[in-house]
């Protein structure tokens, strides 16, 4: 296994706050992200406005498009960790946090995110509440519309609802995995989990929950992490005062990513339920994807993954 190689270009922002507190580590994991990473880095000075002490860490999973070099050249002064291999999203986060002081809060960002001005300050302010472990912002699409980024814990009910009546209708009725409650999206509040494009994680949550689970190479790692946060008696909060744009959606166009997402959904569910419940959950996915195979290669890949997945039941 290749050891991660770190390259530093500090610009005076990556120092602890008074008495060793109040610092923020911004963690970005890249894999062939050159087309979107500069936009994120450009948004950071305004997005981090009001944060006195921060550092930016870019963890590169052996990109072939110069992502790491772009990060090093950017004036934000990122520290780059080269993994030397495509180790996955969770492993990238763990590689970064292994270099971060335990008193620091984290802000984990996908490279295709754009922070709105002051977004980080709002997130960090919520992390000061003793009961809060993770805070997520209001996510906007490129068109400026609020994205339905909030989710319910996966269950047989959510899986069968999404399969039989579709994710949009199941969300509107309130029985699908996607949360569509307009009041929650307008006012914020406690949630079960949210898509992991932007996650602010408190130092206390880091201490209690520990590392991210690297067995989830990509997808479901944030579901697992936020479940462990909630199990530790800390809350996950949706804060509408903080906003970010997320381009996203790559899995819908990529059969490999669709298959990986499907496999990890079943694997995650199996960790928390018995074989019969897992069989029903998996069957719901098979039925749902069978009904939608004509809609594109992503659905066909997801169906194959659900049919052929081994070692979970």
Image (cartoon, rainbow, N blue to C red):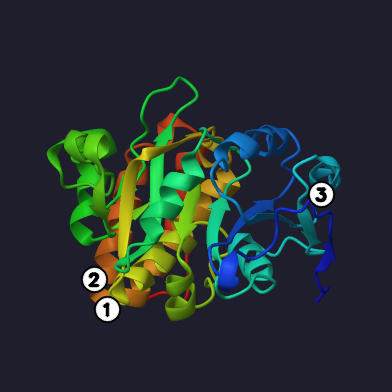
Q: Quadrant of the N terminus?
A: bottom right
Indicate left or right for 290 with 186 as reference.
right
Q: Give x and y (percent) for residue 105.
A: 52, 63
The image position of residue 285, as x and y in percent, is: 33, 53
Where, by quadrant of the figure, is residue 225 drawn?
bottom left
Residue under label 3, please give it.
68
Instruction: Identify the residue at horizontal 50%, vertical 24% (top origin).
Output: 142
Q: Which residue is mark 1?
A: 274
Q: Secondary structure at mark 1?
A: loop
Q: Residue furthest front?
A: 18
The reply to whether dot 2 and dot 1 touch (C-beta < 8 Å) is yes
Q: Residue at x 27, y 49 (%)?
A: 177
Given contact means CB atoms under 8 Å apart, are the residues at marks 3 and 2 in contact? no
Front-lying residue, 222 or 292: 222
Q: Position of residue 6 (x, y in %)?
A: 82, 65
Quarter that holds the C terminus: bottom left
**In the image, residue 35 lies at what x, y percent?**
73, 33
């Amino acid at each position: 296994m290749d050891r991660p190689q770190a390259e530093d270009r500090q610009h005076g922002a990556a120092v602890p706050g008074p008495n060793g507190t109040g610092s923020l580590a911004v963690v970005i994991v890249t894999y062939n992200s050159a087309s979107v990473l500069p936009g994120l880095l450009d948004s950071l000075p305004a997005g981090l406005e009001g944060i006195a002490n921060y550092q930016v860490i870019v963890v590169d999973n052996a990109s072939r498009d110069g992502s790491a070099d772009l990060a090093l050249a950017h004036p934000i002064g990122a520290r780059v960790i080269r993994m030397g291999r495509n180790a996955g999203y969770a492993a990238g986060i763990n590689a970064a946090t292994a270099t971060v002081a335990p008193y620091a809060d984290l802000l984990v960002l996908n490279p295709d995110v754009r922070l709105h001005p002051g977004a980080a300050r709002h997130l960090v302010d919520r992390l000061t509440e003793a009961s809060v472990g993770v805070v997520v912002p209001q996510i906007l699409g490129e068109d400026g519309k609020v994205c339905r980024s909030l989710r319910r814990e996966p269950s047989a009910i959510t899986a069968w609802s999404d399969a039989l009546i579709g994710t949009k209708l199941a969300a509107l009725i309130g029985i699908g995995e996607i949360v569509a409650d307009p009041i929650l999206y307008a006012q914020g509040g406690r949630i079960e989990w949210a898509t992991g494009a932007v996650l602010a994680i408190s130092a206390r949550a880091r201490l209690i929950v520990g590392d991210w689970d690297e067995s989830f190479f990509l997808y479901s790692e944030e579901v697992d992490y936020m479940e462990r946060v909630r199990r530790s008696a800390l809350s996950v909060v949706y804060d509408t005062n903080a906003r970010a744009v997320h381009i996203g959606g790559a899995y819908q166009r990529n059969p490999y990513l669709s298959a990986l997402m499907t496999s990890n959904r079943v694997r995650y569910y199996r960790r928390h339920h018995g074989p019969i419940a897992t069989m029903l959950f998996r069957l719901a996915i098979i039925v749902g994807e069978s009904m939608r195979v004509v809609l594109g290669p992503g659905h066909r890949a997801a169906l194959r993954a659900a049919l052929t997945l081994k070692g979970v039941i």
